[in-house]
Image (spheres, rainbow, N blue to C red):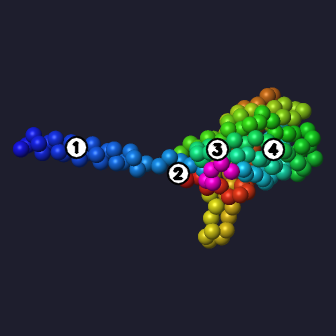
Amino acid sequence: MLKSASVLAAAVLAAAGFAGVGSAQAQTISPANTGFTLSGTLQLSQSTTVNCAVSLSGTTNLGGTGASITSGSFAPGDWQCGWLVSPSSFPWAVTLTGGTGISISGIGANSILGNCSGVVATTWTNPTTTPTVQPSSVSFSNHSIPGSPSTCYITGTLVSSPNLTVTP
């Protein structure tokens, strides 16, 4: 009797463990398989600091497990944007890193003073309706990107159109 109770308890614990694994959900971006634009103003710093109007275009993948930023442009803000400072190295891969965390790989910019390219880890902000309506966005707060002749830094917020939601 004791042996069969132990076997039954082990079976129940194993089933509970498998149920926990099965109920875990993977992080996703929705809607999946859709185009989007990220736009706003970013402050870019390397040897000098400029404020650029940024527009980036991309697509979420079929399963909603990531995205790709396929093109983009910088415009004034400051006069150097779009002429002396421009985005580079497309496509940029957007990877989900847990919770509402994202990583953007291959992000790059070129200027006559140098270039930057690398990975930026940041957080996605999902759209809200209360207390006020806020669109989905990604923010950068002095995030560093390796560069030559020195490290680059980006600060600012880019708003998504349409709204994308990252589900943890």
Earlier sequence position, callout 1 versus callout 2: 1
Above or below, comparing residue 128 to residue 82 in the picture: below
Mark 2 surroundings: few (<14), some (14-19) or many (≥20) residues within 10 A: some
Q: Amino acid at mark 4?
A: Gly
Along the line of sight, the residue nearer the viewer: 164 or 62 = 62
Q: CA distance from mark 2 to mark 4?
A: 27 Å
Mark 1 surroundings: few (<14), some (14-19) or many (≥20) residues within 10 A: few
Q: CA distance from mark 3 to mark 4?
A: 18 Å
Q: Give the label, 1 or 2, closer to the camera.
A: 1
Do the residues bearing badges 1 and 3 touch, measured as CB atoms within 8 Å? no
Q: Name the mark on residue 64.
A: none
Q: Give the label, 3 or 4, closer to the camera.
A: 3
Q: CA distance from mark 1 to mark 3?
A: 39 Å
Name the residue beneath numbered marker 1.
11
Q: CA distance from mark 1 to mark 2?
A: 30 Å
Earlier sequence position, callout 2 versus callout 3: 3
Residue depicted at x 69% and y 41%: 68
Q: CA distance from mark 2 to mark 3?
A: 17 Å
Instruction: Indicate the position of residue 88 as horizontal and vertical percent values.
Output: 80, 36
Earlier sequence position, callout 1 versus callout 4: 1
Earlier sequence position, callout 3 versus callout 4: 3
Q: Quadrant of residue 97?
A: top right
Above or below, comparing residue 21 to residue 88 in the picture: below
Along the line of sight, the residue nearer the viewer: 22 or 51 = 22
Tag 3's secondary structure? loop
Residue depicted at x 93% and y 47%: 79
Q: Give the label, 1 or 4, closer to the camera.
A: 1
Q: Name the mark on residue 72.
A: 4
Q: Name the mark on residue 61.
A: 3
Do the residues bearing badges 1 and 4 touch, measured as CB atoms within 8 Å? no
Tag 1's secondary structure? helix
Q: Name the mark on residue 168.
A: 2
